[in-house]
Each structure stands twice: as C-alpha cells, then as structure tokens.
Image (tube, helix red, strand yellow):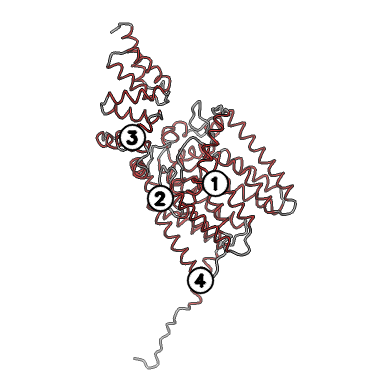
Amino acid sequence: MNPHYTNTIQEPDKNSFYQAVQNIFSCKIFPYIFFLIIIFIVYARSVLFGITELDDVALVTSQYEYLSDPYNMIASFFKSVFNEADDTFYRPVLVISWIIDTLIGGGRIWAYHLSNVIYHFIAVCMLFNLLKNLNLSINKSLIFSSFFAVIPVINQAVSWIPGRNDIIVAIFVFGAFLFTVKYNNSGNFKYLFLSAVLFTLSLFTKETALASFIVFPAYIFLNGKENFLKKTCILTGALLFCVLVWYLMKSSFTGTKEIGIFHLVSYIKIAAVRFFPANLQYVSKIFFPVNLKVMPVLSGFDTVLGLLVSALITSLVCASKKVNFSNILFGLLWFIMFLVLPYFQNSYFILEHRAYIAFLGLILILNEIKLNGKIKNVLPYLTVFYFLFFIAVSFVNNIKFENKLTFAAAAVIETPRNIKTTFLYGRKFLDNGALQTGAYFMKKNYEQKSIKDKQKDPLNAAFIGLFAWQRGDIKEAKKYLTIAAEKNTTIHQTYGALANIFINEERHKEALSNIKKAFKLNPENPEYFRYLKYCFNRINNKQ
C-alpha cells in the first residue's frame, strides 16, 4: 500500500443538506406539489370507484344523452337539476361540469371521479392563497390547507360523484372571498367586479352560496379599514344584484313551492331544533373523525363530543394573548352561516360533506390560538401525528363509496335503526337477484314496535308494504300499502302493488283506482298501461 495514500472521500456537509431541504420548502411551487401528493395518496383509488345509486344515477348515468350534447351547456341554465315539474334545485354550473366529463370520458364513470379529485385539488390551492391574503403566515397557510386536503369529514364530497357540488361551490366562494379581501385592502373596483362574478357562479352551483351575501360584507365591516362603511354598502349592493339575477333565473326555470305561514313556522322550528346539536356534531367530526357515516343523523355521542371540543377551543382562545376577537367572531359567523341553510330542509340527514366550505371558519378561529410553554414544544410532533391520522382515516373511510353495495352496507351498519338505510341495503341485494339476502336486510330492524312508531310516515309504510309484497306476504303488504296510499304517498310502486293485489282478488274497480294513481305518477311504466287495459276490459266484461 502506498504510504502516501490518503482518503480523499469527504463527509457530507450537513449544512449544505439542510440548505437544500430549506430551498425545496421555500420554493413557491412546493405547496402545490405537496397538496397534489397527499391528495393522490388519499383519493387516487377513488378514480376507479363505481356509483352508489344515490342521486348519481338520476343526475349522471341515466342522463348520458343529455350530458353528451355540448349545446346543453347553455340549455342547463334554463332547467332544474332533476328536470321535474316540482324540482326546485337550480344548479346549472354543476350540470355543465358533468357535461364536460361526459364529453371527455364518453360516459365512463372514472372521468367523473377523476374530475372530483381535480376539483378538490383546485379548492385546496384556492384556500391556500386565500389564507395567505388573510395575513396568515406561509407555514400556517400550508399546514391548514394540508389538513383541509385530507380531512376525513369531507370524504363524501370527493369520493361520491354528486358530492362535487360542495367542492365547486367552494372554489367559487373561496375565489369570491379572496377578491373581496383584496377589494377591502385596496378599494380597487376591479376586485369588486371579480368577486361579484365568482359569487354569481357560486349561486348557479349551489344555494349554500347565499351565505356569502351576509358573510362577505361582515368581513369588511369587522375589519374596519378606511371607508369600511362605504365599502360594505357598495359590496352589499353588488352582491344583492347578483342574488336578484340568480333568483329571477331560478324562479323562471324551476318548480316553485308555496310556503304558507304554517310551513314557514314548521321550517324554522326544524332548523331551531337542529341548530346547536348539528353544529356541535360537525365540530366533533372535523376534529375527531371517529363516527363518520354515509347517511348520518343527529347523534348524542357526536353532540357531546362536539361540546367538549368547543369548550377546549374556547379555553385555548381565552388563554391566548393578543387575540383578535373580530377574527374569532367572523370565523364563527362563517362556520355557522355555511351550515345553517340545509337545516331548514325537511330531511333529518346531517350530511358530512356540507362541512366543506364551513371548515374555513374554524381555521380562522384556530389561527388566533397562541400556545405557550411545554405544549408549544411538542406541538410540531402532535401536528404530524394528527396529520398522519387524518390521512389514514380518510384512506379507510372513502372505500365506503366504492360502489352501491359498499355504500348500502355502510349505511345499514352505521345507522341500523334507520328504516331508510335498511331498505336501501335490502334493495341493492334484491336488484342483484339475491332475494333471500335482500329479504333479510329489508326485514332487519322492522320489529313490530318500530313499525307502530313509524307507520304514520307514508314513506316507511310504503317500504314495509312493498317488501312484504315482494316476499309474498299479501296480508301484511295490503295492510301497510293501504296505510301509505291513504296518506297519498308519492311512491308510484305503492299503487301498482295494490292494483296487482286487487287484480288477483278480482276486485277490478279498486285495482283500476290504484293503477290510475300509479300511472299518473309514472306514465312511462309500460306495466301500468297493461294493467289499465286489463282492468277496463274486465270491468266491461271483455276477455
């Protein structure tokens, strides 16, 4: 060995390594790449998902002919979503998004799911830029946006095709609010115009955007910058004009429901009863996603847990120094206003994807918390653990939306005492020819006490009666189908099944009366036409 040989291999320079890492993190494009990676981890497999047969059939797969015509992008502004006489849902931008998917994917389901993931990525990027303009630091904006990208409570919005409605409206609302913030800071009317345009598009996507009409002016008023009263009035006027345009279009091309004073009082009562427990339930599921459900209802467990979480957040805010209570108030207003409108609907499902836009309100509140002492030192480790926990829960939870069977199974397992979810699961098996298994789940939890409590609801009575008719129990079927018919149910199969029973009993006048009702509700059913002809012939003594 050469005695003059020396090892020329040098140890790596740790400082240069850390500098390289720091350069990566400081790169402007890094946050967007990071968002893309974590969203891909959680939602990549959802692109291969099928349909749940909950709204996605009526809205997408059965509308291929309409959605495959690009000219219907314009026609969508002159019709309701479900295209029914009494349909009040007016969401043309949502329909346009499906038309684009249909043209690109040729009606293949993966195209719709892929678009959901892309829209979610855009919404996360939009939120990131919005938070920066709200004077949050780059690091905080990155952290909050990353949590938003993987938070389990909004899995349904991304993994369920119709759930994209909340994503698209969030993109427009976040964008409109971003320009509202810029208008407040500069007074430039260019930003006011852009905010109004995006606000209008959000209204044409989903009615939830109406909350912006209250929330946006509240932001300018609470921030109290120069000429804030003038800016508040100008913004309010601009938004009001947008609302009027939207309302005129909506009222002209959708069904209308007359709301009398008693109906109005009833809706207010429903919203008031739900308000506190539902809001607390959303808080619970955002921070502790341990009770996520595909068809959730009010839960005592979630309400109590949400109350504890709210108390903890309140105590942390009170213990913090230099808290901007205007931001706290605005965050609370944002969270409540973007959740409250669905409470007025006559539906007891507290769907989780509705928290999509509302989550921003909690971000603004959490931003005001300033921790000190030992907990500040362990906070980075807790944040990483919590973030990885969210990714794991989201990855496991979104498989529920893979297809109609996994969705229905999740529904009946998570809410076993809900008669609608039990029927949903049983129906999936019946549709697939597994009659015995379907019958089991259709009958599951239909104990006599439960039936007595719920038989006043024509929907539940119809479900019970139809199941009994399908399995051949004519006596029970007749009992509950009659209950549903007497309460004027809109389920046309109720009258069709009753007509079939009366035909077999040779009570043709009763059969004719019921089949007329079934035919009126669904005139496209050829079986009902055949029944009508048969009953008329029998009544007139024609063979």
* Residue beneath disc 1: 170
Give the SS element for disc 3: helix
Q: How many marks?
A: 4
User: In the rendered structure, which amino acid carries the disc numbered 1?
Assistant: Ala
Labels 3 and 2 touching (C-beta < 8 A): no
In the image, taking residue 10 as reference, residue 214 lies left or right, namely right
Residue 111 visible in the snapshot = no
Q: Residue 374 shows which numbered tag?
A: 4
> For residue 412, which quarter of the picture?
top left
Q: Dot 1: few (<14), some (14–19), or many (≥20) neighbours within 10 Å?
A: many
Give the SS element for disc 4: helix
Residue, far top: 541
Q: Which x, y percent locates residue 332?
A: 58, 51
Which one is in front, 509 or 195?
509
Instruction: First in sequence, mark 4 or 3: give its number.
Output: 4
Against 322, residue 192 (above or below) is: above
* Residue beneath disc 2: 291
Instruction: Report the Cα–Cα distance between label 2 and label 4.
Output: 31 Å
Instruction: Report the Cα–Cα distance between label 3 and label 2.
Output: 27 Å
Screen quadrant of the C terminus: top left
Instruction: First in sequence, mark 1 or 4: give its number.
Output: 1
Instruction: Report the Cα–Cα distance between label 4 and label 3.
Output: 55 Å
Instruction: Report the Cα–Cα distance between label 1 and label 4.
Output: 37 Å
Instruction: First in sequence, mark 3 or 2: give its number.
Output: 2
* Residue beneath disc 3: 449
Q: Dot 4: few (<14), some (14–19), or many (≥20) neighbours within 10 Å?
A: few
